[in-house]
């Protein structure tokens, strides 16, 4: 039987390795000069095309200047003065620099969308392709597995499109909706932008229409399809919908505070909670979750992006006094101050008796890191006056492996967390509070906003003080605070400040650090200081489209206001 096929685009990624959904594992080229007959008889090509649509999901570890995006917000300060971070910190992102400053995210997302569209087109006759050169009656078990895998991939293609559009609209607002496989220059550049709300509804339709065709749980799938843990499944698809609807309900995109938008967001988060049927354990080891491959086997995880074993995070972010370290992005006093005390403050050590997430996230002065005591006072090993030393008095610990020997080029795997359960609980707490208040539990919901927030806090430490506020505004502030500390360095803070419309206040104030010295008794003394400038303009709530994108559209694409 003759199988229809479509012309391949330039690079098609190879099969997923280690269950990754990231380009690090998906950069092997497939020969695009194969004859149609060869393509038709090569079943592995079908799976390679399916895997290719994951190849443009980006690691958050390298989102800005090859490091965390946190330095664009009040969460961290980049040690080096140069780089694209400066453009965000001074509010001078423009159509001429946005493509480089954002790691080409606009084009990357559309390449991912195009890969998904291509797979859907190529797989129209996938059943026949899977039957070629095969006795389907004698091999009915494996043939059945292949058919199920084909249908899962088809559903995943729609979820992939939803994911990439989610990433696009949080940065650029409304964008063109592309569902064909034409070359980019013939495609989205000639399609006008849909409104933000129209893209939101498109994403929701993609998820709602195809969620029931997804694998429920790759870890427990009866077919035991090897290497597929990491593809989209039901809970990760629902998490996309929950995040999109939360952003759509937020002040930036819901200026009239339409409560029905918050109700939709709460229901979407509830759907994830129902599917996962999970309760976060109290007093969990927060630090361990972010180390190496730990998240890959943790029930809290929803969707992860894995990277091969390397040491780029440690080289970028170890203190400059550690051999091989470059200080990188360093946490601010703004972030450190947000971690609450759970005991009596120690006047000689402001970092003791604090929320344990502080010690798991930040390397503080006087603590032990890389088998030595951090001393940032004048004359100390980590003297802040040394070239490229931290400007804030802090270093990053979260995601970073302690004692990795960089001089011997030791390596460790990294896992970027795109969705996890604590994030879903905080989405739920925020949406429920805005829709119904802190303590209401309407029919169809399994907990109140307060109960969801408390579960996250108890998972950090049951010694944290209870949240007792009953006012919607005060509870909103409690949720904002919890997102700041629980999700630090996971690429939420900057976008949260934008969607809450808080950026014009928070990001127009210098970020702070501490100046460290010693008194006559040899005790450390800490003086709060400004550590970096921040400027944010109203236009910066959306990023501009690149100038080349607008020009190449021939007038079809309109630029965001203010650029």
Image (spheres, rainbow, N blue to C red):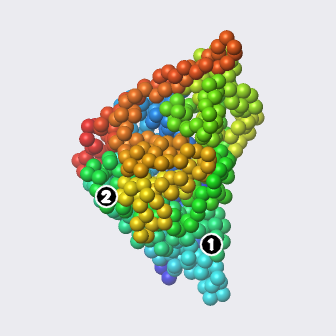
Query: Quick check: can you spot residue 431?
Result: no
Q: Residue at x 74, y 28 (%)?
A: 372
Disc 1 and disc 2: Cα gap in Å? 38 Å
The x, y position of residue 153, in whole percent, is: 52, 69
**Above or below 469: residue 157:** below
The x, y position of residue 249, in whole percent, is: 34, 54
Density class for disc 2 (Cα within 10 Å; few <14, some 14-19, many ≥20) is some
**Above or below 14: residue 558:** above
> Which quarter of the figure has residue 360?
top right
> Which quarter of the figure has residue 443?
bottom left
Q: Nearer the viewer, mark 1 or mark 2?
A: 2
Report whether 487 appears left or right of 87.
right
Q: Classify mark 2: helix, strand or loop.
A: helix
Query: Quick check: can you spot residue 144?
Result: yes
Q: Residue furthest bottom?
A: 137
Q: Classify mark 1: helix, strand or loop.
A: loop
The tag earlier along the polypeptide, 1 or 2, is 1
> Which quarter of the figure has residue 384?
top right
**Above or below 357: residue 273:** below
The x, y position of residue 236, in whole percent, is: 51, 62
Q: Residue at x 55, y 44 (%)?
A: 465
Q: Residue at x 58, y 63 (%)?
A: 278
Q: Quadrant of the C terminus?
A: top left
State the residue in front, 279 or 405: 279
Circle 1 is placed at which residue position?
221
Q: Residue furthest top?
A: 520
Circle 2 is placed at which residue position?
259
Label placed on residue 46: none
Density class for disc 1 (Cα within 10 Å; few <14, some 14-19, many ≥20) is few
The x, y position of residue 150, in whole percent, is: 53, 73
**Above or below 453: residue 359:** above
Q: Residue at x 46, y 28 (%)?
A: 511
């Amino acid at each position: 039987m003759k199988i229809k096929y479509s012309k391949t685009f330039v690079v098609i990624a190879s099969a997923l390795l280690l269950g990754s959904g990231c380009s690090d594992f998906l950069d092997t080229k497939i020969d695009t000069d194969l004859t149609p007959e060869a393509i038709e008889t090569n079943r592995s090509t079908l799976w390679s095309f399916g895997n290719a649509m994951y190849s443009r999901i980006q690691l958050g570890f390298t989102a800005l200047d090859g490091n965390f995006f946190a330095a664009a917000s009040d969460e961290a300060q980049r040690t080096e003065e140069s780089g694209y971070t400066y453009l965000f910190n001074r509010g001078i992102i423009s159509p001429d620099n946005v493509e480089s400053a954002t790691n080409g995210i606009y084009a990357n997302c559309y390449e991912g969308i195009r890969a998904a569209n291509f797979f859907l087109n190529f797989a129209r006759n996938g059943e026949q392709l899977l039957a070629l050169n095969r006795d389907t009656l004698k091999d009915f078990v494996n043939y059945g597995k292949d058919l199920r895998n084909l249908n899962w991939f088809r559903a995943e293609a729609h979820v992939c499109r939803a994911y990439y559009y989610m990433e696009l609209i949080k940065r650029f607002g409304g964008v063109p909706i592309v569902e064909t496989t034409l070359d980019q220059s013939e495609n989205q550049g000639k399609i006008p932008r849909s409104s933000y709300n129209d893209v939101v509804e498109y994403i929701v339709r993609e998820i709602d229409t195809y969620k029931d065709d997804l694998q429920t749980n790759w870890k427990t799938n009866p077919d035991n399809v090897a290497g597929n843990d990491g593809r989209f499944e039901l809970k990760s698809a629902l998490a996309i919908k929950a995040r999109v609807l939360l952003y759509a309900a937020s002040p930036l995109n819901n200026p009239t505070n339409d409560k029905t938008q918050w109700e939709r967001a709460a229901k979407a988060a509830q759907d994830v909670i129902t599917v996962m049927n999970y309760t976060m354990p109290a007093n969990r080891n927060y630090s361990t979750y972010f180390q190496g491959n730990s998240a890959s086997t943790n029930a809290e995880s929803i969707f992860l992006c894995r990277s091969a074993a390397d040491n780029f995070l440690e080289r970028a972010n170890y203190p400059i006094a550690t051999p091989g370290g470059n200080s990188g992005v360093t946490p601010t006093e703004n972030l450190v101050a947000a971690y609450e005390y759970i005991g009596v403050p120690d006047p000689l050590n402001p970092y003791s008796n604090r929320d344990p997430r502080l010690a798991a996230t930040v390397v503080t002065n006087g603590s032990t890191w890389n088998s030595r005591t951090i001393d940032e006072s004048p004359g100390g090993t980590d003297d802040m006056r040394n070239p490229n030393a931290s400007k804030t008095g802090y270093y990053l610990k979260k995601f970073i492996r302690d004692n990795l020997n960089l001089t011997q080029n030791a390596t460790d795997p990294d896992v970027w967390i795109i969705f996890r359960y604590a994030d879903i609980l905080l989405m739920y707490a925020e949406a429920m509070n805005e829709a119904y208040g802190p303590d209401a539990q309407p029919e169809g919901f399994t907990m109140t906003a307060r109960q969801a927030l408390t579960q996250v806090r108890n998972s950090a430490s049951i010694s944290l003080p209870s949240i007792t506020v009953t006012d919607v505004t005060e509870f909103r502030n409690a949720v904002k605070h919890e997102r700041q500390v629980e999700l630090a360095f996971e690429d939420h803070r900057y976008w949260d400040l934008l969607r809450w419309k808080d950026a014009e206040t928070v990001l127009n104030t210098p970020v702070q650090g501490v100046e460290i010295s010693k008194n006559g008794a040899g005790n450390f003394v800490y003086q709060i200081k400004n550590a970096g400038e921040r400027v944010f303009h109203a236009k910066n709530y959306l990023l501009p489209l690149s100038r080349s994108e607008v020009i190449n559209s021939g007038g079809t694409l309109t630029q965001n206001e203010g650029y």
